[in-house]
Image: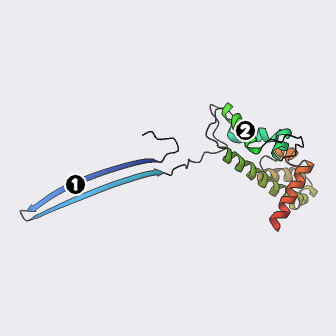
Amino acid sequence: MELSLAAAITTTTTTITTTTTTFSSSYTIAMTTMIYTRKISLKGKKPYRSWLKDGVNGGPSSMEVLIRWLSHRPNYKKWKREDYSVDRIPKKDLLEEIIDNLRQVGIYHRLAKDVASKISTLQSNYRLARKWSETEGYRFKQQSGGEKLWHDEILKRFAYWDILHPVFASKSSAMDLDYLDHLMMI
């Protein structure tokens, strides 16, 4: 029987030590010490791998590949379905394109659902940073030297601001994000 990569991995180590001590013909004490270790990897569950540290042979990480793909405005427009051409590309196909980009740099462990989830997280984190920028961040900008303070603070809140803000903040994307914020409040 052949096990697939997704099959459960089980490692069991058992050590049994028996020591027998005889005090007299009627008393014998046997001491048994057992050490039992079992590691179980749940079926289908893969270990976490950082999106920032999984580059192969000094190549780009998963996050760098994804950010590069998202920062290309036509790609993000397709993702947001802002490409109003007759032939809309299904997200499944876009995810496969990103997975292909990851494979080209030697990264084979990312699944399409992981990539979709990471894009969603990036969008959510961007919305939070943008909301901060429009409220509290606005006060930073009003101070003397505030632009630098604001920039430092926005990068703490969303490290990819400089790269993704020009794409994520496009007019229709910003309206979509406002609408999503509105739905979340309902």
Q: Nearer the viewer, residue 31 or 66?
A: 66
Q: For marks 1 and 2, give the CA distance.
A: 58 Å
Q: Earlier in the sequence, mark 1 or mark 2?
A: 1
Q: Find the residue positioned furthest to the bottom.
A: 186
Identify which amino acid the numbered label 1 is placed on: Thr
Answer above or below: position of 17 versus 92. Answer: below
- Of badges 1 and 2, nearer the viewer stands 2
Residue drawn at (87%, 59%) of the image: 179
> Do tag 1 and tag 2 residues touch (Cβ < 8 Å)?
no
Q: Which residue is mark 2?
A: 98
Which quadrant: the C terminus? bottom right
Seen in the image, is 145 located left or right of residue 93? right
- Residue 168: percent from the left, percent from the top? 85, 48
Q: Secondary structure at mark 1?
A: strand
- Residue 69: percent from the left, percent from the top? 78, 38
Q: Secondary structure at mark 2?
A: helix
- Image quarter for residue 66? top right
* Mark identifier at residue 18: 1
Residue drawn at (59%, 48%) of the image: 48
